[in-house]
Amino acid sequence: MIGTGLYIEDISQEVATMQAAVNANIETTFFSVVVILVVTVAVITVLTLAINLHEHRLADKNLKELAHRTVMFQEDEKKHLARELHDGINQLLVSSKCHLELLSHQIDNKVLNTHLEKSQQSIVTAINEVRHISHQLRPSALDDIGLEAALSTLLQDFRSHSGIEIETHFDTQQTGKLKSEAATTLYRVAQESLTNIEKHANANRVTVVLQQMGNMLQLMVRDDGVGFSPKVAFNKRGIGLRNMRERVEFIGGDFEYISEPGFGTEITVLLKLDGLVYG
């Protein structure tokens, strides 16, 4: 050691310096590994959440599309059944009534005429019942004449059996005939709203507005009834409100309702006419 000019203290210092450098490298490497691990876990977590969210949205979209197709299939079946009742069974009943009337003119027996009159009354009752069922399933005016005519008939029937005053404002002169899907949606919203009003609102007056505003079509149903708390509504009547909202939103519309206990309820639907009108 003396011959080389090296001292034990110098060697120890050099070893200590190297040891410190090695420890620093180990700490840096460990910190880097931890950071990489944390970042990797975070990336995997974010990707997993993103994939799950995408799958959830996709499943929700598919479920809504399935529900909408089911509803429209039911509407088609109602339309077919209503036509069969109106054009088939109803016409047979009318024909039977006419034959009984002709027969009654040929018979002088009072007892037989009495039975014929009762038979005619029963057939008239059956005709009215078939017409009512057919109209409830799907009014022919909705397909033959249009939404405005179907709503007018619906409101007349509602006034006659509920006794509630109806105020209407229809302004759709510039609107072409709505496609079946849009017309059906608006009609069902109005029908469901009137049903809720009759059952729950205890209202004296109902206002129904159907008007075109530029490229928008608005349907509004407002009553002066008891109203309700929106939070409580979804516990009691939420299914009806939710169904109306989903049907409207599926065809690209906006659905809103405003209500407060003691101040009535207002339901509004807004539809963009692009793609929903035949012209």
Image (cartoon, grey):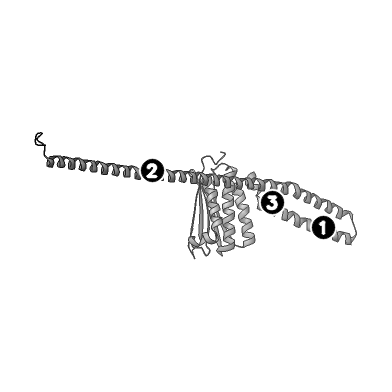
Between marks 1 and 2, how big is the CA–CA gap? Answer: 80 Å
Which label was assigned to residue 119?
1
Disc nearest the viewer among 3 and 1: 3
Label 2 CA crowd tier, 10 Å (few <14, some 14–19, many 20+): few
> Residue 202: x, y in percent?
56, 65
Between marks 3 and 1, how big is the CA–CA gap? Answer: 22 Å
Residue occupying the point 62% across, 54% down: 154
Disc nearest the viewer among 2 and 3: 2
Which label was assigned to residue 55?
none
Task: Single out the residue that lies furthest toward the top.
Answer: 4
State whether residue 172 appears in this view: no
The image shows residue 263, relative to residue 24, as above or below, that is: below
Q: Upstream in the sequence, badge 3 or badge 1?
A: 1
> Residue 189: x, y in percent?
56, 52
Mark 2 secondary-structure assignment = helix
Q: Which residue is mark 3?
A: 134
Q: Which residue is mark 2?
A: 43
